[in-house]
Amino acid sequence: MKRSNQILELSENMIEDGQKPSATALAEKLSWSDEDVHRCLNILEKNGEIETYAKNILGKRLRMVSVYRN
């Protein structure tokens, strides 16, 4: 499975479980570096499979992920 597909699948599962996935949370769950996750998110966003947005939480700026539903 491609790395970007792993990110997409994990994001979908987190959303279904009522969680709001961030790039940091995805990196922690997959034990990947933040840079690898951001790279995959950029690919997925370019392909129109996800949308990301920035959100400030407790003074920290996080990149949040939303998944397009079929």
Image: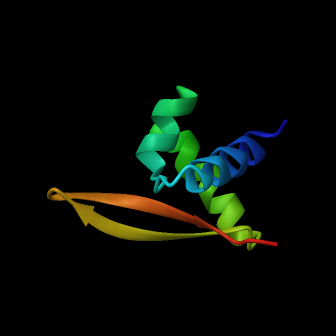
Above or below residue 41? Residue 9 is above
Q: Which residue is found at the position 42% from the left and 60% from the top?
A: 63
Does residue 53 appear to the left or right of 8 in the view shown?
left
Q: Nearer the viewer, residue 26 or 42?
A: 26
How many marks overall?
Answer: 0
Residue at the limit of the structure toward the top, as seen here: 31
Residue 60 lies in quadrant: bottom left
Q: Position of 28 compared to 54: left or right?
A: right
Q: Where is the N terminus found, in terms of image quarters?
A: top right
Q: Position of residue 9 (x, y in %)?
A: 72, 47
Query: For this rendering, which residue is in front, 25 or 61?
Result: 25
> What colour-coding does the image apply?
rainbow
- At which x and y percent is residue 22? 45, 53
Q: Residue at x 44, y 42 (%)?
A: 25
Position of the C terminus by quadrant? bottom right
Task: Please identify the residue farthest to the left as the structure is shown.
Answer: 59
Which residue appears at 14% of the width and 58% of the height?
59
Residue 20: image location, x then y, percent: 46, 57
Residue drawn at (50%, 55%) of the image: 18
Query: Between residues 56 and 46, which one lies in front from this camera angle?
Result: 56
